[in-house]
RNA sequence: AGCGGGGUAGGGUAGCCAGGACAUCCCGUCGGGCUCAUAACCCGGAGAUCGGUCGUUCAAAUCGACCCCCCGCUACCA
């Protein structure tokens, strides 16, 4: 019998920023678990995706960076491709939309739809900037909202009151690039006649009762409220050109073109296998199911637009299931790439192994509703579930067996009951994982794996091999054999979730080969009895929680140290500068503009606060490897100094973590530091009263404070690792700026 | 505004579509056990008027109506 085939399509991440945990949890990890499961079962899987490289977000980013769309799109494609590989997401092909192949496939579809009468050319009005000499997409025009009077409304929708506008409706339109007033010009565009597909779409959706209810409902609602024909071309240069004469300066809208990537990627994959027709097996055989993994915002493109395109084109399979996920949020805020906090995969993988991240995201997957991400929760779940329950079970079984037997012990007679108990537990886990994973219920699938691990722990306790070791060595080996069978089953069942570590576990069980295609049956295969066991090492280590982002987390970029001034000389070539030799645990040279405020004698022997991760700079020919922090008010300048015992080199942390990256002087200037007087345990006077955690500080004492931004109403006092407050060397008015 | 989702012990979360006996699991907390293991594992307890009100029913977290609060989408952010 031929192996069942399955097509897995994954929403294309946008090539204007690095992918983050939200992409992972929402649309990348689920299909990888799904495809690994299917491959374990021996099914043939084609899994494709790529970078969505066209569209305005890319051009906007390029303009901001003074770069080209090509450059931005290529850069993020490479970054994201690597991030996806590093996370262990295995695609048959992860390509991109800016390829000849994609353009060819899009053109083929465009022309066939045109031929079949589903595309139509129509006249529309569009903003045109006479100064930039180009048509302006909605986002490039701003103006005054005619409903609420908001002066900075976008031309398509007012962010304040939510009103939407047609072209030309907004008052006083302005081109956001050159601020000229755009005019209205007539332009020709192709419209996709979605209305042609209303009836067939409705019956298609009704037929797909296995869709998640949110996907069903959302789609039905859309359909029932009626479809509108949509323009699928626009006036801009970055994108797939329209394949017709007389259409210079027009490209195909990304929302229309990007979904076609599923098909073009499949064809590209087929090319690469040497059989250019291979894609057909996955797209034209009605028995092959196509699964589309994406986030909830993407639902209509996959349940309405893409099926319409496919229907209009003909002969290709429609999506079988669209298991859309909700969002992963960060403290309730949307984890987004265009605004708000972002936790990108490359940075996370520098800190943690992929399997730890995969575990957490699978356990906290936003399947039914938005799920919240926090580092605290990450630490808790990884340490208490993955490490303590699963990892520790592996390790206690393997290390005990290795230490006392050195090889896989046989199963003697007389363990009928125990044997049956273990068989049942494994069998149950197999059924559950199969049921849940084949129906895209990944959280439950993982839970079933963890339940088996918990059973293992309970079983290990109940048979107490450590006491059998003295009383009945054969029986002890027997119960270990049974535990090893549980471990082996866990290796296979855990593989879709934790591919890297379970692969290593496979070897620790003295097994040959690896887990992969068709390994499902190995969950219950005979152990490698009699084989020597390799020395086991714990598979997972506990993680330490990175500190939560506080309003002051930007401060973490500063590396401040206590410095002892050893020697002061006048700068040979400047009349305001002095050259300081400072001990910050190691000797460095600083150039400071303190002449006139301090004498050489006053500074020598003084403890100061130095920023040490400032890029070294030459000041009038003398190298300065940092900067002495000083407060200035009017014509007064006073250096900051610890108000108690402090060692040279000691960090000034204020309880925060620190990154060691070098800062430019400009970056440093963005930090807001001011002097203030402690009022009570919760407030300080920085020229105005401000909330600050000043518990334990002496009232009336002057200290330096960090502010998230100027005018903020919370502040953080500076103090050293040993909690010595940083004050001012003398008296200064409150609110004095520190530089 | 329209549409969609959500509100369950101190925190997080399952169950809800197909209504039923002590409401799931993780963390925390309290007590006990074990000592093979990464201060880990195992057992037990306390802790919830299942957002509110009204209704249907022998029976409601679950079905219906109304209300309150969060969040997302509305065609250029998974």
Image: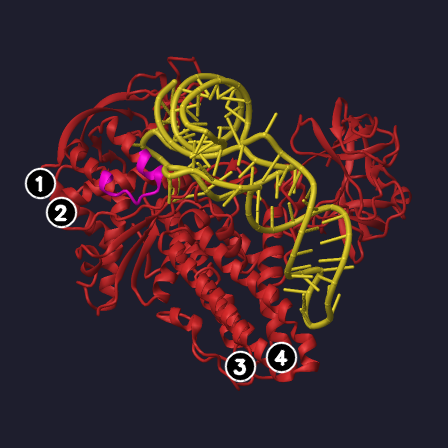
Q: Are marks 4 and 1 on the same chain?
A: yes
Is label 1 in contact with label 3 (beta carbons under 8 Å)?
no
Q: Chain A hue?
A: red
Q: Which residue is mark 1?
A: A116
Q: Which residue is mark 3?
A: A411
Instruction: Give x and y (percent) for residue A349.
Output: 53, 57
Q: Are marks 1 and 3 on the same chain?
A: yes
Determine the chain carrying the residue at label 1: A
Chain letter for the yellow colouring in the rendering: B
Residue A156 position (above or below residue A73)? above
Q: Which residue is mark 2?
A: A314
Determine the chain carrying the residue at label 3: A
What predominant SS class does the magenta segment belong to? Answer: helix
Q: Find out whether residue A213 is within the magenta segment.
A: yes
Of the residues tagged 4 and 2, which is closer to the observer? 4
Determine the chain carrying the residue at label 2: A
State left or right for residue A2 relative to residue A292: left
Instruction: Give x and y (percent) for residue A522.
Output: 41, 73
Secondary structure category for the residue under label 4? helix
Can residue A427 be seen from the camera position used here?
Answer: yes
Determine the CA span between mark 4 and mark 1.
Answer: 74 Å
**How many C-alpha atoms fall within 10 Å of the one at disc 2: few (<14), some, or many (≥20)?**
some
């Amino acid at each position: 019998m031929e192996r069942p085939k399955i097509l897995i399509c994954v929403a294309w991440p946008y090539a204007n920023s690095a992918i983050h945990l939200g992409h992972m949890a929402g649309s990348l990890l689920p299909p990888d678990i799904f495809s690994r499961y299917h491959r374990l079962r021996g099914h043939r899987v084609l899994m494709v995706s790529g970078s969505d490289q066209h569209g305005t977000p890319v051009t906007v980013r390029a303009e901001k960076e003074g770069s080209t769309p090509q450059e931005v799109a290529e850069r993020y494609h490479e970054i994201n491709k690597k991030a996806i590989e590093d996370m262990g997401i295995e695609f048959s092909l992860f390509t991109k939309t800016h390829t000849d192949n994609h353009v060819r496939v899009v053109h083929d579809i465009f022309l066939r739809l045109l031929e079949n009468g589903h595309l139509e050319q129509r006249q529309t009005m569009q903003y045109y900037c006479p100064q930039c000499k180009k048509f302006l997409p909605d986002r490039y025009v701003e103006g005054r909202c005619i409903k609420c009077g908001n002066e900075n409304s976008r031309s398509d929708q007012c962010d304040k009151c939510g009103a939407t506008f047609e072209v030309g409706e907004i008052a006083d339109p302005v081109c956001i690039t050159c601020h000229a007033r755009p005019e209205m010009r007539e332009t020709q565009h192709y419209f996709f006649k979605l209305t042609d597909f209303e009836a067939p779409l409705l019956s298609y959706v009704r037929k797909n009762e296995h869709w998640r209810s949110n996907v069903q409902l959302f789609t039905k609602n859309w359909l029932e409220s009626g479809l509108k024909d949509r323009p699928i071309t626009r006036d801009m240069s970055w994108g797939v050109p329209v394949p017709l004469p007389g259409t210079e300066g027009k490209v195909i809208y990304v929302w229309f073109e990007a979904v076609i990537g599923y098909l073009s990627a499949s064809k590209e994959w087929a090319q690469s296998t040497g059989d250019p027709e291979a894609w057909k097996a996955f797209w034209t055989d009605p028995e092959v199911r196509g699964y589309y993994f994406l986030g909830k915002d993407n639902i209509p493109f996959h349940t309405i637009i893409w099926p319409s395109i496919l229907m209009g084109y003909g002969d290709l399979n429609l999506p079988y299931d669209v298991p859309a996920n909700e969002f992963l949020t960060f403290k309730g805020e949307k984890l987004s790439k265009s605004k708000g906090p972002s936790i990108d995969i490359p940075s996370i993988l520098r800190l943690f192994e992929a399997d730890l991240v995969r575990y957490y995201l699978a356990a906290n997957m936003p399947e039914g509703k938005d799920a919240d991400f926090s580092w605290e929760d990450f630490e808790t779940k990884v340490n208490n579930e993955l490490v303590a329950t699963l990892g520790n079970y592996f390790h206690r079984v393997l290390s005990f067996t290795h230490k006392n037997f050195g090889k896989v012990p046989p199963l003697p007679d007389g363990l009928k009951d125990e044997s049956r108990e273990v068989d049942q537990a494994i069998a149950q886990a197999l059924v559950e994982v199969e049921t849940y994973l084949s129906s895209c219920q990944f959280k439950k699938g993982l839970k079933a794996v963890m339940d088996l691990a918990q059973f293992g722990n309970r079983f290990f306790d109940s048979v107490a091999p450590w006491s059998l070791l003295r009383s009945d060595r054969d029986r002890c080996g027997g119960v270990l054999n049974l535990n090893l069978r549980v471990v082996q089953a866990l290796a296979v069942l855990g593989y879709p979730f934790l591919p890297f570590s379970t692969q290593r576990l496979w070897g620790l069980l003295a097994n040959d080969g690896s887990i992969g295609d068709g390994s499902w049956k190995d969950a219950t295969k005979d152990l490698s009895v009699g084989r020597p066991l390799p020395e086991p090492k714990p598979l997972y280590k506990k993680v330490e929680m990175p500190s939560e982002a506080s309003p002051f987390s930007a401060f973490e970029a500063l590396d401040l140290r206590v410095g002892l001034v050893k020697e002061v000389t006048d700068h040979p070539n400047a009349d305001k500068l002095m050259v300081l030799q400072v001990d910050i645990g190691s000797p460095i040279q600083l150039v400071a503009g303190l002449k006139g405020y301090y004498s050489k004698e006053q500074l020598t022997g003084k403890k100061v606060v130095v920023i040490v991760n400032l890029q070294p700079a030459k000041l009038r020919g003398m190298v300065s490897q940092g900067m002495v922090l000083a407060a200035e008010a009017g014509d007064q300048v006073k250096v900051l100094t610890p108000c108690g015992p402090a060692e040279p080199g000691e960090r000034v942390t204020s309880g925060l973590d620190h990154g060691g990256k070098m800062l430019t002087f400009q970056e440093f200037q963005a930090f807001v530091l001011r002097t203030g007087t402690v009022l009570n345990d919760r407030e300080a006077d920085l020229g105005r009263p401000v909330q600050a955690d000043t518990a334990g500080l002496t009232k009336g004492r002057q200290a330096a404070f960090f502010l998230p931004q100027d005018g903020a109403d919370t502040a953080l006092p500076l103090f050293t690792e040993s909690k010595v407050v940083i004050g001012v060397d003398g008296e200064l008015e409150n609110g004095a700026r520190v530089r």
